[in-house]
Amino acid sequence: MSQIYLDRLARVRAAMTQQGVDTLLLSVGHDLPYLTGYLAMPLERLTMLVVPRDGDATLVIPRLEAPRVVEQPGVFQLLPWNETDDPTRLVSELASGSTAVAVGDQMWARFLVELLPQLPGASYQRAVDVVGPLRMVKDAAEIDALTAAAAAVDRIAAELQSGRIPLVGRTEAEVSADLSARIIAEGHQKVNFAIVAAGENAASPHHHAGQRIINDDEIVLCDFGGTMDGYCSDITRCVYTGDIASDVAEAYEVLLEAQQASVGSATAGTSCEDVDSAARDIIAAAGFGDYFVHRTGHGIGLEEHEDPYIVQGNRRALEPGHAFSIEPGIYVPGKWGMRLEDIVVSTATGPLALNSADHRLANVG
Amino acid sequence: MSQIYLDRLARVRAAMTQQGVDTLLLSVGHDLPYLTGYLAMPLERLTMLVVPRDGDATLVIPRLEAPRVVEQPGVFQLLPWNETDDPTRLVSELASGSTAVAVGDQMWARFLVELLPQLPGASYQRAVDVVGPLRMVKDAAEIDALTAAAAAVDRIAAELQSGRIPLVGRTEAEVSADLSARIIAEGHQKVNFAIVAAGENAASPHHHAGQRIINDDEIVLCDFGGTMDGYCSDITRCVYTGDIASDVAEAYEVLLEAQQASVGSATAGTSCEDVDSAARDIIAAAGFGDYFVHRTGHGIGLEEHEDPYIVQGNRRALEPGHAFSIEPGIYVPGKWGMRLEDIVVSTATGPLALNSADHRLANVG
C-alpha cells in the first residue's frame, strides 16, 4: 500500500518543483488521505502534513489521534503534539524559510491566520493547483471503486423507479431517511446527502428534505449519494406520482436530450465548458435557459465535489481518467423542478457512463 | 426571531469597535448561524457574511442556495452570485479598505488564500476573539436546549447501564450504530459521534468503533452525542461486561473522584485551567498522571467543541452561562481506558451538571 503513496508523493514533489512551491500544507480535506491514507477529523486540534519540496514529510498530529495513524517510512513521519503545545509553531518551524506555500482548500482558516505572522515573507496559493491535477486523473483501482459505488446507487434508483420505495403519503424527510438507510445497506460507509424534493420544492436545487407530504400527481426529485471504500456515488433521478402532466413531460424530454448530449460530448480533449454548453444550448433552445441555474457538473472521487468542474469559463480539456457528474436541471419556481445526473469517466475511447439506471421519468403513481 | 439576531449583531459590532476590527467575515461554521440563523453547507461554493463595523451586513451566497435563506431586514441582506461570478471578488469589494479583518475559524483556507492579494494592507485575526466571548455565555433558551439534549443522552446512558443495550458478542461498530439510532430516536436531528471502544481499544481516546467483538469481562467506553434543535449533547459512560477487575475498579474510583471534584470546582470566577487541575491533580496523585493524555474538557453549544476549553494555560475565568464538558480519562496502553463526562454550566450560584446518568461503573455482564 505504501508504494501508492510513495508514487503520489513523488508526483506531487515534481509538481511543486515545476510550480516553484517550497512547502505544501495539508490538513482536513481529501488531499491528505490521497497522499497518506489518513483522513483527519475536522477538529479544533490541528492535524497538518508538511511536505517540503525536498526532504521528509511530517504529519503534525494531536497526540490523542496519533494511535489511529500508522507511520509510513519514506512517506511521512509523525510529530505528535501535546494538549499544551502550540501546533502552528511546530508547523511554522518545519516550513521555516519558505516563500511559496501551498495550502489545502479545506484547511480551517484559523490555522492559516495563525501561520501568517509566523512565516513572514511567504506567499500563499491553493494546494489544489499542485495536487488537484493528479487527483483528477483516476487510476484503474479508483475507477473500479467509483463504478462499484455507482452500481450501488443504481440499484436504489431502480427500486425508486419501480415504485418499491413508497412515496405518496410520506414526508420528504421520511423518504430521505429511507434512501439514506438503503445507501448504507448497499455497501456505503457514509451517507453524503439524500435530497428529496416534491413538486414546487424541486425548484430549489439544494432543497432540504422536510415535513412536506408527497402527494399524487407530482414530480419527486431524488439526488443521493455516499462514500464507499473512500470513493463517492452521486445520482439524481426524478419520478412522477401519477400520469405525467404534459408540461412536465415536455420539459423532461428536453432535459433527457440535453443530458445525453452532454454525456456524449465528454470525450478526452473536449473542454469542460464545452461539455457544459452541450447541455445548456439544448435547454436554452427549448426556451428553458433561465431555468437552468447551475453548472452542468462537478468532478468526483474521494470527494463528492472536486475538480474538474463542468462550468462555463473552465477551459480545461478532459483527460482520460477524469471523473465527473453530468447533471443539468430545469427549475420553474413555484411549480416544479427536475434534474438528471450520471457519473461519467472520460476515457481514451470515449465517455463511459458509470450509472445505468433508467433515464426516463417513471410514473410510480 | 429577528430580534435575537439584531441583539447579537449589535453586541458583535460593539466588540469590533472595542477591538478595532473593521470587517468580520463568516463562512461555514457556527458563528454564521449564531448571527443569522443560517448554517452554510461546507461547499466549494462560497457563502460568506460580510459584517462591516458600521453599515449593513451582507450575506454573499450561491444563487442556488439563496432560496433556503430568508433575508432579515436590519440583520443582513442577500447578495446571490451566479455560477460564473467570482464570489471572493464580491467579498473583497464589500471589505475594501479594511485593515483589520476577523475571519471565522472554519472558513475554508482557499477563500482566505484568494482574498489575501485582493485586500492588500489588511491584517487578519480569528473571529473567535470577537464572536466567541458572546457565544460562550448561553442565555436561558440556550441552556434549556442544552438541558434537553443532555436529558436525551442520559436516557440512552441509562439503557446502556441497565444492560438493555446488548454488548457481548456484538462488534463495536454494531453498538455504535445502535447508539446512533437511539440518538436520533431520542430527538436529535443529527448524530455527531458514537465512540464505542472495548478493552484495550478504550486506551485510544478517539478510537473509531470497528469490527472488534465485545467480550465478557472487559470495559466498554461509550462517548456519544448529537445535535438537537441546534444544540449539542455529549456524554461518556463506561460499563463492564462482568465482575469488575480490581485494577480497573481502583482506577475508576480515582476517575470518579477527579471528575466530581472538577465539576464541583467549576464555579463562576474560577479559571479554566484551575478546573482542569482539579481533576488532573487527583489523577496524578494516584499515580495515573501519565495516563491522562488530554485536556479536561471543551465548551459546547451550537458546536460540539467550542470555547471555553478546560485546559492548562487557559486563564479565562468562568462566567455564568458558560457551558462545557468535564471529561477526565485514564488510558493504559494495551490494557484498558476509561473516561467519565458530563456537561456542566457555570451559574451565579455554582456549577450545574446537565447530565445525571449514574456515574458509577456498572457491571452489565
Image (cartoon, coloured by chain):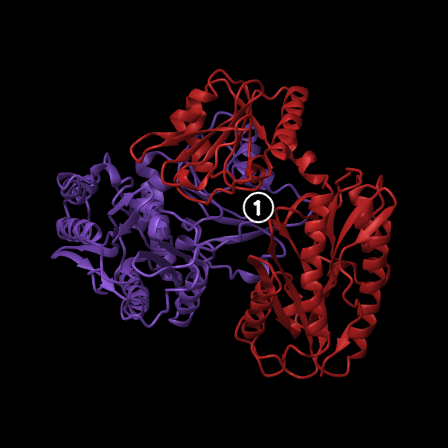
Chain colours: A red, B purple
Amino acid type, residue under disc 1 in the picture:
Leu
Q: Quadrant of residue A164?
A: bottom right
Q: Residue A75, how many percent across, how many down?
A: 55, 28
The location of residue A84, given as percent across then percent down, is 29, 33
Relative depth, front residue between A323 and B179: B179
B153 is higher (above) or lower (below) than A15: below
Q: Quadrant of residue B91?
A: top right
At x 46% / y 43%, what residue is drawn? B106
Q: Looking at the image, which is closer to me, A278 or B32?
A: A278
Residue B297 visible, this orientation: yes
Quarter holding the C terminus of chain A?
Answer: bottom right
B125 or A21: nearer the eye? A21
Per the image, the residue denoted by label 1 is B46
Q: Is residue A214 left or right of residue B290?
A: right
Quadrant in the picture for the N terminus of chain A? top right
The relative height of residue B139 versus residue B305 in the rendered view (above or below) is below
Residue B365 horizontal side relative to residue A23, left or right: left
Instruction: Using the image, name the chain to which the residue with label 1 belongs.
Output: B
Q: Quadrant of residue A79?
A: top left
> What percent of the width, then of the height, locates residue B110?
56, 37
Residue A332 visible in the snapshot:
no
Residue pictured at 72% horizontal, 74% vertical? A161
x then y, percent, for residue B176: 42, 61
